[in-house]
């Protein structure tokens, strides 16, 4: 198994994609809006992916709620943004966070996904770029830490593995890493706190942000100083996945970006474009995943399996919707 999760191009798996994935055996695949039409189509695509990926590969989806949702109405529920949940305040926001995580988890598990790229653990900032914006639960680190945890607990209750993002904190950045490299002076203790409080998260995702004091040359995704000296130093020992390596914050070929992220200490290189040439460029360059990565992947899967509860989605949705009423 190669330490990469990759995107695919459309609603069906092409013959070229199937051959590439079967030959190179990545650790998983991620689906986006371009891959989603309706439940029948998604089920067929999931079956096609499972047929060519390794037996223990994961399928991931970016499903936070709010504007970051790949499974959408009319076939799936609409879910509130993190900000809307946080704005409820008090125990209402705590309960709404758990219910939303559980509901997203139930839907994603039913669609065939193992891993959901949520919750966002970034702390909101008044002058931060809107790329985080309403994806943050709050401006208070302690509140973000709590709501992120209970959202993740909801996902786990549905048997789905959560991914906390974007370590060590993206909220204060004033640029969108999809289009350019954000630069901050330092890793802020407040930004880091939600990750410190959630070191038992099964997965974390790195930030494509340059923190000058820690590493003048490399963004966190490709910085051993930050991955080992900051992210892992919190005590986190789960799966560390890069943010999407196709984003324009990074430089170099797809393979160069992936190799740099893995050399810095990421367990998994995530590349989401779905362009087969880029996917092949990465997979041909990578060796087999080391034992520690396989152990972390197995532990994350076991954690979700052991946490799964029997959930009544209709009842959960009724309770959540009542909480979210204005």
Image: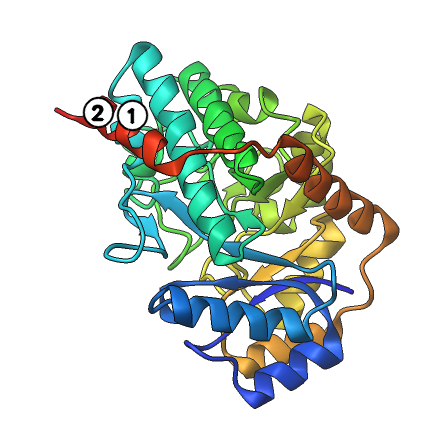
Q: What residue is shown at x 29% (from left), y 25% (from top)? A: 319
x and y percent of residue 199 in the render?
A: 65, 26
Q: Which mark is residue 322?
A: 2
CB-based contact (under 8 Å), mark 1 and mark 2: yes
Compared to residue 175, the image places residue 252 above or below, namely below
Residue 319: give its label.
1
Q: Nearer the viewer, residue 8 or 308?
A: 308
Quick check: can you spot residue 188?
Answer: no
Label drawn at residue 297: none
Question: Residue at point 46% right, 61% down?
Answer: 247
177 left or right of 206 in image: left
Q: Position of residue 227 (x, y in %)?
A: 68, 39
Whether 163 is drawn above or below 230: the answer is below
Residue extending furthest toward the top: 90
- Expressed as whole percent of the image width and height from the top left, the position of residue 262 reads 72, 55
Q: Residue furthest bottom?
A: 15
Q: Report helix, strand or loop for mark 2.
A: helix
Q: Quadrant of the C terminus?
A: top left
Q: Which quadrant of the figure has residue 215?
A: top right
Secondary structure beneath disc 1?
A: helix
The quarter in which the N terminus is drawn is bottom right
Q: Residue at x 56, y 42 (%)?
A: 160
Residue neighbourhood size for the residue with mark 1, other residues' Cα within 10 Å, grouped as few (<14), some (14–19), many (≥20): some
Give the image location of residue 201, x and y in percent: 62, 32
């Amino acid at each position: 198994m190669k330490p990469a999760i990759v995107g695919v191009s459309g609603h069906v798996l092409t013959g070229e994609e199937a051959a590439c994935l079967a030959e190179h055996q990545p650790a998983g695949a991620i689906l986006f809006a371009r891959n989603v039409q309706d439940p029948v189509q998604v089920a067929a695509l999931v079956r096609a992916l499972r047929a060519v990926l390794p037996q223990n590969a994961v399928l991931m989806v970016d499903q936070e709620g709010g504007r970051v949702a790949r499974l959408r109405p009319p076939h799936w529920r609409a879910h509130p943004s993190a900000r809307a949940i946080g704005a409820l305040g008090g125990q209402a926001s705590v309960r709404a966070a758990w219910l939303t995580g559980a509901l997203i988890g139930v839907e994603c598990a039913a669609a065939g996904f193992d891993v959901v790229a949520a919750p966002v653990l970034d702390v909101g900032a008044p002058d931060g770029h809107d790329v985080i914006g309403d994806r943050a639960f709050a401006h208070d680190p302690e509140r973000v830490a709590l709501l992120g945890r209970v959202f993740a607990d909801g996902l786990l209750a549905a048997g789905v593995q959560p991914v906390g993002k974007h370590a060590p904190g993206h909220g204060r950045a004033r640029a969108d890493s999809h289009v350019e490299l954000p630069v901050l002076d330092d890793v802020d203790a407040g930004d880091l706190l939600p990750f410190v409080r959630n070191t038992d998260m099964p997965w974390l995702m790195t930030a494509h942000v340059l923190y000058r004091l820690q590493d003048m040359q490399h963004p966190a995704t490709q910085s051993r100083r930050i991955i080992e000296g900051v992210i892992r130093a919190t005590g986190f020992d789960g799966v560390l996945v890069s943010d999407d390596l196709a984003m324009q914050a990074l430089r170099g070929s797809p393979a160069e970006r992936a190799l740099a992220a893995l050399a810095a200490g990421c367990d998994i290189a995530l590349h989401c474009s779905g362009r087969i040439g880029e996917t092949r460029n990465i997979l041909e360059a990578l060796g087999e995943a080391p034992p520690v990565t396989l152990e972390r992947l197995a532990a994350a899967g076991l954690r979700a399996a052991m946490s799964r509860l029997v959930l009544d989605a209709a009842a959960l949705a009724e309770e959540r919707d009542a909480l979210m009423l204005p």
